[in-house]
Amino acid sequence: MKNKLINEIENAVGKKLAIPSDFDYLSDCVLKRNRAYVSRTTLMRLWGYISENVRPSRTTLDILSRFVGYSGWEEFVAKHDGSPANCEPPSIPVFGRRLSVGDDLLVGDIVRLLWQPERVCDVVYLGDLKFRVVASVNTRLREGDTFQMSVIVEGEPLYLDNLRQADRPPIAYVCGKISGVMFERV
């Protein structure tokens, strides 16, 4: 059961935890999302990075279960009892800084989108949830491309709809699929 929890946590943060700085990162994420602290050392023990014959406390398991959207360890175990009806993990709340396009932008506002590795894209708001790319570095988006989006949540993937590039048919596109996007107004 512990390994299922580890897998869900790694899916939630978008990477396998393998080096000490990964556990620092997870500790910070848990603190921000749950307002509860789990030390790097405790996490390293749970992942088996530190070989000590210590079992995680119920409190630690509750905190980590809440991190991935359950009410606690008991609900996590109940949802993973092997029955097909319980295979779907719960939705995970998103706590990043957000920009609601319809409420927070005016026509002509420029937003800089940044994601890894070293991708930068400046877009101008055209109204009605529509944007045009005005500058792009290291991305597949090109100056003049247009798309629609309604919200940007920092640290989460950004979903673009109706992306139009030259004479190609419109498509959906995801920016920052692994590490999420950051944004700033220009």
Image (cartoon, rainbow, N blue to C red):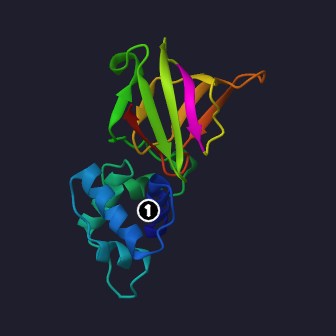
Residue drawn at point x = 34 percent, y = 17 percent? 103
Q: Quadrant of residue 168?
A: top right
Residue closer to the observer: 3 or 138? 138
Image-based side of 165 in relation to 8, left or right: right
Image-based side of 152 in relation to 121, left or right: left
Instruction: Tell me the kind of residue under disc 1.
Output: Leu
Give the answer, above or below, for where 128 lies relative to 169. Answer: above
Residue drawn at point x = 35 percent, y = 88 percent? 52
Residue closer to the observer: 8 or 176? 176
Q: Where is mark 1, residue-wise?
A: 5
Q: Main secondary structure of the magenta part?
A: strand
Residue drawn at point x = 39 percent, y = 52 percent? 68
Give the answer, above or below, for where 150 lies relative to 5. Answer: above
Residue range (magenta): 131-137
Q: Position of residue 55 (x, y in %)?
A: 32, 79
Q: Position of residue 102 (x, y in %)?
A: 40, 16
Quarter of the image for the N terminus: give it: bottom left
Image-based side of 59 in relation to 116, left or right: left
Crowding at label 1, few (<14), some or many (≥20) Cα neighbours within 10 Å? some
